[in-house]
Amino acid sequence: MKKTATRLSDGRELLYYDSHGNAGRDAPDLRGLPPAAPAVEVRHDVLLGEHVAIASHRQDRTHLPPEGACPLCPSRDGRLTEIPAADYEVAVLENRFPSFAGATGRCEVVCFTADHHASFAGLGEDRAALVLATWTDRTAALSARPGVAQVYCFENRGEEIGVTLAHPHGQIYAYPFVTPRTARMLETTAAHAARTGGRNLFDDAVAREYADGRRIVLDGDHWVAHVPYAARWPYEVHLHPRRRVPDLTALGDAARREFPRVYLDLLRRFDRLFGDGRPTPYVSAWHQAPVRHPHRAEFALHLELFTVRRAAGKLKFLAGSESGMNVFVNDVPPEAAARRLREVAGP
């Protein structure tokens, strides 16, 4: 993998990741943007013990521009974008409208391809492997930054999810705190170890799925995908490496080699779920151990993939119980969801 670092005209960092060469990656940003100065404040909710980011500048972020005005396409034919090069494989840049910035963390955009009409599911295995290498490199780099407590790589796909740019891309958040969801998982993991004489909760949860079998979706040599027993979303899959590791940097070579095939298979199954030919909206989220946590070794790296679509033409909305009390009500039994995901496996 070849990595090329440069700067945009407002001072933000831009990184190109290429499988081999990187011709043209030294193209300068000619837009003459004013220096980036996002105003982000992190406030603490004393009742819940959680953090909230206040980022008013995000009100002005680009929202569903026409194809000819996409800021994540390469700069071509006289049109200047966030990517000065005329082509690229994978590009990572500091978000122009970040939720966290400076002393409060960092937000990056990961462009999976220069092709505006592509999707992650349509990428080849080589490109998916390059994206995995990019996520891993950024996890290592951001984890080393002072003040960063947790690194979160994710993709939001589809307007139903709230995506504001159609170009195939994901994001990486470097949080200055441990997120509530991760903190809760660490608490339950510690309680399970105390209750069982040191057994690991993640290991036992995956073993439970194997023993039951009904919710297993895909079983590879180095990865296993299952619908969780208490799934919150209509179609939700958790993808675990067979050998537990705390984050992407600790993945073994064999798991890295198998990941592109397994992950692309899952994404393509999601697109076949409803039989209407429409791309399925989803969130794909890497859960990694906090950077400097005394029990990070007990955490299990895994990817959670879910859609807000519950049936063709129908969405699951977070209404009173979910939004108000964080108590989910799922209309699709996890066993039925797993069965459907097995049915839509490709040839």
Image (cartoon, rainbow, N blue to C red):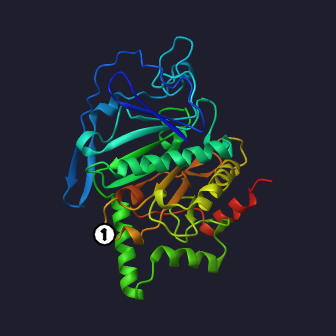
Residue placed under numbered mark 1 in the picture: 294
Position in image of residue 78 (x %, y %): 52, 11
Quadrant that contains the N terminus: top right
Residue at the limit of the structure toward the top, as seen here: 78
Above or below, 134 relative to 336: above
Q: Does 58 sit left or right of 168 as displayed?
A: left
> In which quadrant of the rendered image does the C terminus lie?
bottom right
Q: Residue furthest bottom?
A: 197
The number of callouts visible is 1
Q: Residue at x 40, y 81 (%)?
A: 192
Residue placed most toward the observer, 156 or 132: 132
Along the line of sight, which residue is nearer the eye, 155 or 280?
A: 155
The amino acid beneath tag 1 is: Pro
Q: Please tell me which residue lies in front, 18 or 211.
A: 18
Report if residue 336 is visible in the image: no
* Residue at (52, 58) in percent of width and height: 304
Q: Quadrant of residue 340?
A: bottom right
Q: Is residue 201 left or right of residue 125?
A: left
**Residue at the image point whose x is 31% and y is 58% from the top:** 178
What is the residue that sits farthest to the left in this orientation? 46
45, above or below 134, in the image: below
Query: What element does badge 1 sit on?
Result: loop
Task: Using a 10 Å C-alpha cutoff, classify the residue at mark 1 as few (fewer than 14 neighbours), some (14 to 19) or many (20 or more).
Answer: few
> Is residue 152 shown above or below 77?
below
